[in-house]
Image (cartoon, coloured by chain):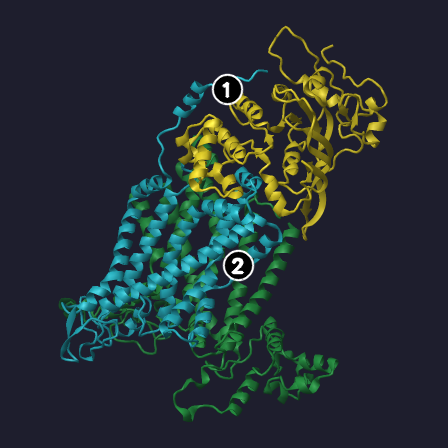
Amino acid sequence: MSVAKINLDELNNEALLVEEHESMISIYWGRLKRHRLAFISLIVLALIILGVAIGPLIMGQMTYYNVQKDAYVNYARDTQDLQSKNVSPSSDHFLGTDELGRDVLFRLLIAGRLSLTISLSVVLIQVSIGIFLGAVSGFYGGWVDSLIQRIAEFFIILPALPLLLTLSSILRNVRIPGIPPEWSQSIFIIVILSFLGWPGSCRLSRGVVLSLRNQQFTEAAKALGMSDLGIITRHMIPNALPPIIVLATLGLGGVILTESALSFLGFGINPPVATWGNMLQNAQTDMLTAPWKALIPGFFILISVLAFNYLGDGLRDALDPRLKL
Amino acid sequence: MINYLIRRSLQMIVTIIFATFAIFVILNAVPGGPLSGLNQTGNTRDRLSDEQIARIEQALGLNKPLPLRYLTWVAGEDWVDDVAAVIGRSEAWANYQTPRCIDAGRTNAGAQTDLETSPCGRGILRFDFGVSWQMARGQEVSEVIWGRLGNTVRLMATVSVLSLLIALPIGIISAVRQYSILDYVVTTFGFFGLSMPVFWLGLILIIIFGFQFRECFGIDACKEAFGSLPYFPSGGVESSRILPGSIQDVFGVAKGSSFDRIIHLTLPTLMLTFASLASWSRFMRSSMLEVLRQDYVRTARSKGLREYVVIVKHAARNALIPVITIVVFEIPAIFSGAVLTESVFSYPGIGRLFIGALGGNDWPIVMAILYISAILVVFATLVGDILYTLIDPRIRFD
Amino acid sequence: MSEVKEKKVLVEVKNLKKHFPIKSGLLQRTTGWVKAVDDISFTIYQGESLGLVGESGCGKTTAGRTILRLVEPSDGSVIFNGTDVATVSKQDLKKLRQEMQIIFQDPYSSLDPRMPVGESIAEGLRIHTNKSAEERYDQVVQMLTRVGMRADHAKRYPHEFSGGQRQRIGIARALAVNPKFIVCDEPVSALDVSIQASVLNLLEELQDDFGLTYLFIAHNLSVVEHFSDRVGVMYLGKMAELATREELFRNPLHPYTQALMSAIPIPDPKQRKKRVILEGDVPSPINPPTGCRFHTRCPLAYDRCKVEEPKFVDYGDEHFAACHLLDEGKPSQLPDMNK
């Protein structure tokens, strides 16, 4: 049989079937923009993040009339004004004051910083642990898989809220030496929530990896001499990422809810440090006289969690592998 | 099938054993410890001497080495003497028994004849959770829990039934009329339900139906005409006295009657139902959507069956399968909700007991509740799994 | 077709076995074995193309993967250029990987969907060389153009290509590390017939240009007929017959080979050919038949076939076959069912 020259025309015809090249990010972005609520959520989240990031900086430079001190003072988290406790919203205090005469808006913004930071850290940590363990578990199979999956199942099966409460209740008196107590409290909360939260992303990434393990591109990488770690990090994890991004986005909202519940019950971050959850703690006693104290922090929790959930929903559609890539 | 059941049950037992271990380690080996709160009073006069602490430790059984403490917590202390006698260390080991057990003669001679009244602990595996340290000092933990259990079960049962009754029809209708205004409202409501802090909803309910109703929302005309709107109690299980203008007063409900209890249950139920309603109606909707796409539904339609029959008999029945198992899985989650609800409404159930015990370092109660809820979750998972494999013939048993 | 002048052995497969355990029961004990590859031996000469044919499930794909040690062999050895691939250490294996590559059957799963194809091609260079990103890119472009693609294709993702193009990309990836030996695992089976020819031509051209050695796995003889210097036939994890292409097609010794051969369509209605239809299905490799594995379907089987396994013997001019009839000097030709 003679070697036929490659027919270039035929090849070009094949190439013509391909439409203009478009990068993956721009495809995803276009799809996400079409999901109106997700797009609005993205804007809302950007505003909230911007607000809690620079809001306190600006307000910290502004002054108000502190009745107790009979002077104009800067807004601050812990500056009290016992002469104007539970004052309703006014031009000095846009969202009123709390039971110690502290400005609710300023505390709200500061609290937002902490709530969002905690939520982001927890999700990052638990997703990193989850992805890695899941990828290892799915890739190697055998006893490694069984062990990791039994542990994950065990964690899923544990009664979450009671256990969280127990752990944080035990650790509430423990301090990490050398750092401010509020940090040490936050670190414990982050550790506890990450510790209990990783199995979700672990199972997800295991599922993806299991389906990828038998794909031929994994074998190709092995045939090229790539190490197992290389295959996991270069091929498995990037492929497992889209569903995990969705899970993580939804998780951000979930962690905000859990942390606020813990703090509300008094087992999370304790005052005077402010989080959205613990600002609701004392709201109950003054619900009649100062309902804004109960309404506003809760409203912020609701809005940001709602935005994360809608964004996650939109991302789920945008990253859906069943749609043509 | 039998093989599968045996394996699942074995797994369940192993899981529970691990759970007891985890609970024990968390509460006893983590820094902090049960007695760390004791000497935190700033007042030096109230501080306890080392001797006193040692006595407390002895009384609470905290002087034992950790492994032995775990074993006696799980399996009781009535066997300690026997084992000690066998390995010839009776003297040392006898000191590890609680005073009650020692008072009974250091042996279990009396105990063995009548296990029910044995002064020695029988261990959580035999449902003896020991004695409360703080919340109800000296009382059996099982009695304390039993006394609160009714309230929590009433709340959880009402919520489960109510949520199912509302969520299933809503989910079905919303799926059948996909993209209708109703569907839009239901899905939006679902998102709100998932995103809302449950305890915040409780606070709002109290503000509106408790305080603002009493104050007529601050509207003078309303106040002059009615004095106050019939308002709800903001907490508790029953009234100690009927307040003028309250809903019980308006409807002439006697204090402590079952109607009084139902009225107290209303707001907590509303709050918890809202939370589970959101996720359950979403499950039902997506399951129904999945089924409606199937060929057999199209076949049923093309046979000329009435739409009602197609939806109720063919689609909804099949769509219920996954939903029911998910609901079984989720029932323990209601307990988590109950912790929050009971705190917001000062409702004396297990959840509030748990919070109180945590706050007061009442370890036996905390460990008992953790253990019971672990069993509950494991059991619900097992039942859910088995239901799933039984209902769905496509699942293989291995 | 390249003429093999001097016969230098590149790959020598000796008694290669791959058995997969079957686990079942409460404790997941091993209750049986799937004998996917069961004691096969053959050699591949440098510069040749050895075809490996058999029905699906006969173990030919597993054989290819075991030779490359993509799956660990259960027993036996694969001597590649003097090194035993089956027992070589991890570090040495990594070096060996450059020399032996594989081209896959399914062009849709053989490329990572989230990686631009250029990066997929450069992957081997990244592992085995210290080349800079630019150098790697240059080589990727070179490879792409060599397989008939354009340089700007490097930045695109697999979903933007057709099956035939993806297969070319897969070839470029294998070629990028400059291998000596390539296992082609049914590289055209998943392609449209119109594109099959161009991919085969490309493979042939590359063989000449780079002096490649192929193990060409296929499930029918017609592709192999045009592509291989020698052809091996597998049945249920065993080699049935191995000979040069001309010899095998002129004088198939094993009854199974004859049956396979009769299944090749001839595009000429006037030409009549021998017709053989095998009874029954391929037995399960979990409990393969005793004796000769083919005896359950062989029209010529007799008592000895059921109890004794035939040896894989050279019947002259490197024409190997495993059949008792040949061993006893009896005729092994199947009767023509047309008569």
Q: Chain of mark 2?
A: B
Can residue B272 be seen from the camera position used here? no
Badge 1: few (under 14), some or many (20 or more) residues near its Cα, within 10 Å? few
Tell me the distance, in whole angstroms, between the alpha carbons under discs 1 and 2. 58 Å
Q: Secondary structure at mark 1?
A: helix
Residue C62 versus residue A310: which sits nearer the camera? C62
Tell me, yes or no, if residue A158 can be seen here.
Answer: yes
Please state if C163 lies on the left or on the right of C215 as rendered: left
SS label for mark 2? helix
Q: Is residue C150 above or below residue A125?
A: above
At label 1, the amino acid type is: Ser
**Chain A shade:** cyan
Of all chains, the one bearing label 1 is: C
Which residue is labeled 2 in the image? Answer: B380
With B203 as the anchor, is C328 left or right in this view?
Answer: right
Residue C39: x, y in percent?
A: 74, 36
Marks 1 and 2 belong to one chain: no
Residue occupying image coordinates x 30% and y 67%: B203
| Residue occupying the point 48% across, 38% down | C122
Chain given the colour green: B
- Residue B180: name its quadrant: top left
Label 2 sits on what residue type? Ala
Q: Is residue C281 above or below residue A62?
A: above
Q: Position of residue B15 (x, y in %)?
A: 58, 62
Instruction: Write down the quadrant of residue A110 in the picture.
Output: bottom left
As drawn, the label of residue B19 is: none
Q: Which residue is mark 1?
A: C194
Farthest residue toward the top? Answer: C270
Q: Which chain is yellow?
A: C
